Image: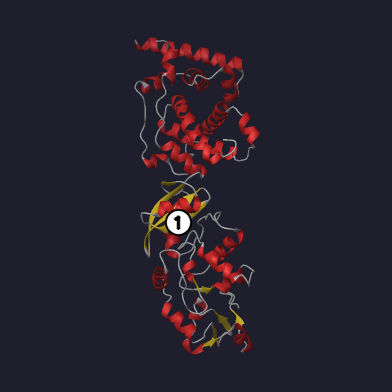
Amino acid sequence: MSIETELSLLIGDLPDGISEGVALGTGIADGFDLYESAIGEVVVTFNPEGVSSLDIADSEFENRFRGRFDRPLIRAEAPHSWGKTIPSAIERGQPGKLPIDLRSVTQFQADVLERTATIPKGEVRPYAWLANEVHRPKAVRAAGSAVAKNPIPLIIPCHRVVRADGHIGNYSLGGPANKVELLEHEGTRPNWLEDLAAHHVRFQGDSSTGVVCHPTCHVIRKSKTADVASFRSLQEAEEGGFRACEVCRPCC
Amino acid sequence: MASDLDAAFPAVVEQMGTRLYWGLRRISGDHQEAEDLTQETFIRAYNALETYNATRIREMKLESWLWTIALNLGRNHLRDRSRRPTWVELEDRGTEDPEIADGRSWDRRLGCLNQHQRTAVVLRHVMGMGIPDITEATGRPAGTVKADIHRGLAKLREVMEDET
């Protein structure tokens, strides 16, 4: 056999991982991996843009992902540059520096979700607050539907958004029972929230500082019980000489 | 591919990936490096194609264009061995080396050629590419490419004679 002929035979099969690696690297497919959370095992999906979704790790998650995102899923490790921060983002309930891919929602919905991501662990905000934060104070229902479409629950902590009437509201990640469990895990007692609502307490202020907050804001929670005053509305607090907290920015 | 890149690209990878991988494998003599470069080449190609219009995609010569990207990446790769794709490293996924019978002997023989000769010989005789395509892929003039192939083959014969 001539050298030329021998050289022409030096081709084998395509190594298994290449097609998958390219699909992941281009974002044609998303990768997925399993993680622990306060409400059990969850599946996180990701692509070169960032984390794209989080869901309950049951036998149907791949179908749900395909139905919503219309992309294939491949089991993979998250990209080295940020994959290691996924467990802490889940535990903290905030993305922090973790890149998130919100291309599946509208710009308005993305704005609402980005504001949702700033609510600290152990605190809750009403839907109206979110609408106000994105400068659309009348779009409370639209803000609610944006939260319902949250593709990355837990990391974007939509469980920290509750109804103003004290009901904790619905939850996409396995139903309201999981929302209660998450809030309790974070030290926000849902019974207490309902209790406040039953007594029409929407805001609380510290009479020694003159600052009024959402009742779960860590600023007011540090106040002495004797100094805490309760209000039905922000107007009532302002009339009493209180000014709005710059941390939780109470509104409405 | 010109109309729906996401739908068409996986087939391009299946079709061209085998040739690209084995060409890079024979040039680099290393499974891991060939795998990294093949993957990275397709990712770069996809990102570029996303910005091209349909006419430009239809008119391009895909294989020599992919080789231009691959050889450029290979040069940078050699310059900086610590460079790694930012995506999942395939070695972590435990992919197996699919080396063929006799492959290692040929890697050793091809390793006796200089980089230009090895690249030219592999593109011409392993890939079966024509001189104009190799010229485009390597950015070297046709006469130089032909000389590289000629000297490369002569060197291979010499090496093989020494083996017997």
**Residue A40 spot, x, y in % from top left:** 35, 62
Q: Is residue A238 above or below residue B148?
A: below
Asked whether the viewer can see residue A115, the reply is: yes
- Based on the displayed image, in which of its 4 quarters is residue A235 positioned? bottom right
**Residue B158 spot, x, y in % from top left:** 43, 10
Q: SS at mark 1? A: helix
Q: Residue at 54% across / 56% down in the picture? A: A102
Query: What amino acid type is highlighted by mark number 1?
Result: Thr
Q: Residue at 56% across / 54% down in the picture? A: A103
Disc 1: which residue: A85
Q: Is residue A61 above or below residue A183?
A: above
- Based on the displayed image, in which of its 4 quarters is residue B55 positioned? top right
For the residue pair A64 and B61, the one nearer the viewer reads as A64
For the residue pair A2 and A19, the one nearer the viewer reads as A19
- Based on the displayed image, in which of its 4 quarters is residue A208 positioned? bottom right
**Residue B27 spot, x, y in % from top left:** 47, 25
Q: Is residue B157 above or below residue A186?
A: above
Q: Is residue B109 above or below residue A13?
A: above
**Residue A218 spot, x, y in % from top left:** 50, 76
Instruction: Give the quarter of the figure containing the N terminus of chain A.
Output: top left
For the residue pair A62 and B108, the one nearer the viewer reads as A62
Asked whether the viewer can see residue B84, the reply is: no
Label 1 marks a residue whose chain is: A
